C-alpha cells in the first residue's frame, strides 16, 4: 500500500513539472500577442487607409480564395503592409488541407494547415520551410515587399524588374513509380 502512495506522489510530481512547463510555454506565446492586433477585415480600401503593420485579419480559405480571385493585386498589396492569416474551412471534417502555395504566392504571412494530415499540402509546407532551417519564417521576395512593385499572382507575365530564367531537366531514370496519376 505504501508503494502505491509513493507512485502516486511521483506521478503527481511529474504532473506538476509538466504543468509548469506548459505554463512557461503559454507565457512565452502570450507575450507575442502584444505584437499583433486582430482586426475585422472590411475592405482593401479601408485597410489601406488604416495601414497599421501590426494589425492582422483572419480569413477562412473560402473567403481568402474569393478575395484572391476577385482582386489578386489588391490582396498582394494588402499583404505588403498588413498581416493576413488563412485557416482551413470549418467544413473540413476529414482534416484535409487546402494548397498553401496559392496564398503564399499572394504574400499571406500565416497559412494554417491541419497538421494531423500529412498530405501534399502539408508536405509543401514542410518543404518550403526547409529553405530557412525550419525556423517557421521565410522572407518574401523583394517585389512582394516593395510598394512600387506590381505583382499579379495569376499573370504569366514577368515581374517588374525580374528577368526570368530557364531550367532544363533531363530525367535519367525513375524508381518506385506507381500507375496512379
Image (spheres, grey):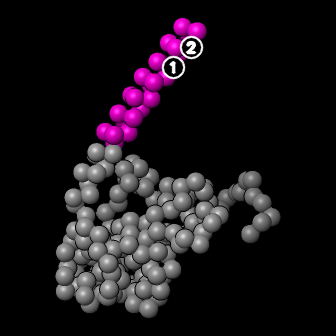
- Whether residue 131 is in magenta: the answer is no
In the rendered image, which quarter is residue 122 located in?
Answer: bottom right
Point out the image quarter for the C terminus.
bottom right
Q: Residue at 39% of width from left, 77% of height from top?
A: 106
Q: Residue at 26% of width from left, 54% of height from top?
A: 32
Q: Residue at 32% of width from left, 88% of height from top?
A: 43
Q: In the image shown, does 36 or 4 lie closer to the viewer?
A: 4
Q: In the displayed structure, does residue 48 sit left or right of residue 131?
A: left
Q: Is 47 rendered above or below residue 83?
A: below
In this figure, which residue is indicated by the disc labeled 1?
Answer: 8
Q: Which residues are magenta?
A: 1-25
Residue 151, image x, y percentages: 35, 84
Q: Is 52 rendered above or below residue 70?
A: above
**Is residue 32 at all visible to an observer of this figure?**
yes
In the rendered image, which quarter is residue 35 located in?
Answer: bottom left
Q: In the image shown, does 10 or 56 lie closer to the viewer?
A: 10
Q: Is 174 rendered above or below residue 3?
A: below
In this figure, which residue is indicated by the disc labeled 2?
Answer: 4
Q: Secondary structure at mark 2?
A: helix
Q: Secondary structure at mark 1?
A: helix
Residue 91, image x, y percentages: 59, 72
- Whether residue 18 is in magenta: the answer is yes
Q: Residue at 44% of width from left, 91% of height from top?
A: 70
Residue 62, image x, y percentages: 51, 80
Q: Residues within 10 Å of mark 1 (few under 14, many from 20)?
A: few
Q: Specify the farthest residue to the right.
A: 179
Question: Which secondary structure is most common in the magenta stretch?
Answer: helix
Point out the image quarter for the N terminus.
top right
Q: Are marks 1 and 2 in contact (CB under 8 Å)?
A: yes
Amino acid at each position: 500500500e505504501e508503494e502505491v502512495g509513493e507512485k502516486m506522489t511521483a506521478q503527481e510530481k511529474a504532473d506538476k513539472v509538466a504543468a509548469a512547463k506548459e505554463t512557461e510555454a503559454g507565457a512565452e506565446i502570450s507575450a507575442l500577442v502584444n505584437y499583433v492586433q486582430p482586426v475585422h477585415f472590411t475592405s482593401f480600401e479601408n485597410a489601406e487607409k488604416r495601414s497599421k503593420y501590426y494589425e492582422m485579419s483572419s480569413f477562412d480559405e473560402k473567403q481568402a480564395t474569393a478575395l484572391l480571385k476577385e482582386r489578386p493585386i489588391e490582396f498582394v498589396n494588402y499583404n505588403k503592409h498588413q498581416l493576413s492569416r488563412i485557416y482551413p474551412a470549418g467544413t473540413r471534417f476529414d482534416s484535409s488541407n487546402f494548397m498553401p502555395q496559392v496564398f503564399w504566392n499572394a504574400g499571406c504571412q500565416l497559412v494554417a494547415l491541419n497538421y494531423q494530415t500529412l498530405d501534399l499540402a502539408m508536405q509543401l509546407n514542410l518543404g518550403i520551410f526547409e529553405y530557412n532551417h525550419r525556423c517557421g519564417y521565410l522572407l518574401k521576395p523583394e517585389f512582394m515587399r516593395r510598394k512600387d512593385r506590381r505583382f499579379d499572382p495569376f499573370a504569366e507575365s514577368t515581374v517588374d524588374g525580374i528577368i526570368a530564367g530557364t531550367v532544363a531537366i533531363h530525367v535519367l531514370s525513375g524508381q518506385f513509380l506507381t500507375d496512379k496519376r
